[in-house]
Structures are given as C-alpha cells and as structure tokens.
C-alpha cells in the first residue's frame, strides 16, 4: 500500500514447476451484476457473469488486458494487473489466471521464475466513474522522475 494511491498492490515472485495445474486468484465481492467489464484492445467489452446458456458457458475465460471490473449501482471492484491476460467472473467472484502448466502444445509452458503484480482497486460507482482505465495505466506505466537542466 502506498500513501495517496487508492489501490493495494500484490507483488508476486514464483518459481513454477507444476504439471496440469491452472493457478488463479479469486475475489468474492459484494457487488452483483449480470455483466462484468474487461479491457480489450482499443476499448472494453462486457461478458455475462451467469452460466445459464451454452453461449454463456463458452465465455468463461475472457482474454483481457490491464483490468477487469465488477460493479453495481453503488460500488465496484477493479482487478488490475501488469502482465496477465485471462479473467473470469461467475456470479460475484472475479478471478485472474496467474500461471498454467498444460502438456500441450508446450510441455514447459510458464515453467521457471515469474515476477508480476496485480492490484485490488475497490471503488464507488461504475468503472468509468472510478477511472479504472487510468488506474490500469498507472500500474503498468510507472512515472519516471528525472532531473533536467533549465531550458
């Protein structure tokens, strides 16, 4: 946690050597909505949080970029990350895929040392009002301070 920063960063270091395992982090939330929002290239997309139809069942893992969000009329929660791209939401549980170890097509997928950060960003209102896009950029593009001469 950092003073003046409205999120909690979780910095992970993992030495991964598992087989046939998918590691996810899960957050049961108090917000409820039939749709969750995800960042995709050049915008965002909503996906259902229910699994009532075959089409909804097929959309369980969402490829997304810097954030995913579940919000209702009062409050919400954005899950930000710096290098992971698979999310899912079922009901009020938001999950991020961290590491995987399939045997095919690459029997050594994700093996070895990993360092990554994900951030918890609770907020009032929806993800647009909460500036979730900006928070994703703040996590991924650190401010670089440098001394400059007069010019």
Image (cartoon, rainbow, N blue to C red):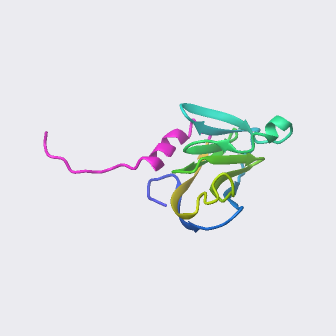
Quadrant of the rendered structure where residue 27 is?
bottom right
Residue 83 on image: x %, y %: 53, 51
The one of 148 and 64 positioned closer to us in this rendering: 64
**Is 119 on the left-hand or right-hand side of 45?**
left
Majority secondary structure in the magenta region: loop
Q: Is residue 96 above or below residue 12?
A: above
The residue under the point 61% across, 68% down is: 17
Location of residue 120 in the rendering, given as x and y in whole percent from the top left corner? 58, 54
Seen at 68% across and 35% down, the residue is 46
Q: Does 19 sit above or below residue 90?
A: below
Quadrant containing the C terminus is top left
Identified at 59% across, 59% down, the residue is 110
The magenta stretch spans residue 134: yes
Q: Is residue 10 above or below residue 59?
A: below
- Inspect this view and state whether residue 150 appears: yes
The stretch of residues the image draws in magenta is: 125-151
Question: Position of 149 compared to 107: left or right?
Answer: left
Residue located 56% across and 36% down the image: 129
Residue 126, visible in the rendered structure: no
Q: Residue furthest top?
A: 42
Which of 125/62 is in front? 62
Q: Position of residue 60 (x, y in %)?
A: 75, 44
């Amino acid at each position: 946690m950092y003073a003046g920063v409205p999120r909690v960063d979780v910095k992970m270091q993992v030495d991964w050597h598992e087989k046939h395992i998918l590691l996810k982090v899960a957050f049961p939330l108090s917000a409820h909505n039939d749709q969750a929002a995800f960042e995709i290239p050049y915008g965002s997309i909503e996906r259902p949080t229910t699994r009532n139809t075959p089409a909804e069942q097929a959309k369980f893992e969402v490829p997304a970029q810097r954030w995913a969000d579940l919000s209702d009329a009062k409050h919400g929660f954005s899950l930000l990350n710096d290098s992971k791209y698979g999310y899912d939401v079922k009901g009020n549980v938001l999950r991020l895929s961290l590491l995987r170890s399939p045997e095919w097509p690459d029997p050594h997928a994700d093996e070895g040392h990993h360092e990554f950060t994900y951030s918890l960003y609770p907020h009032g209102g929806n993800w647009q009002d909460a500036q979730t896009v900006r928070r994703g950029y703040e996590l991924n593009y650190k401010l670089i301070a440098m001394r400059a001469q007069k010019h």
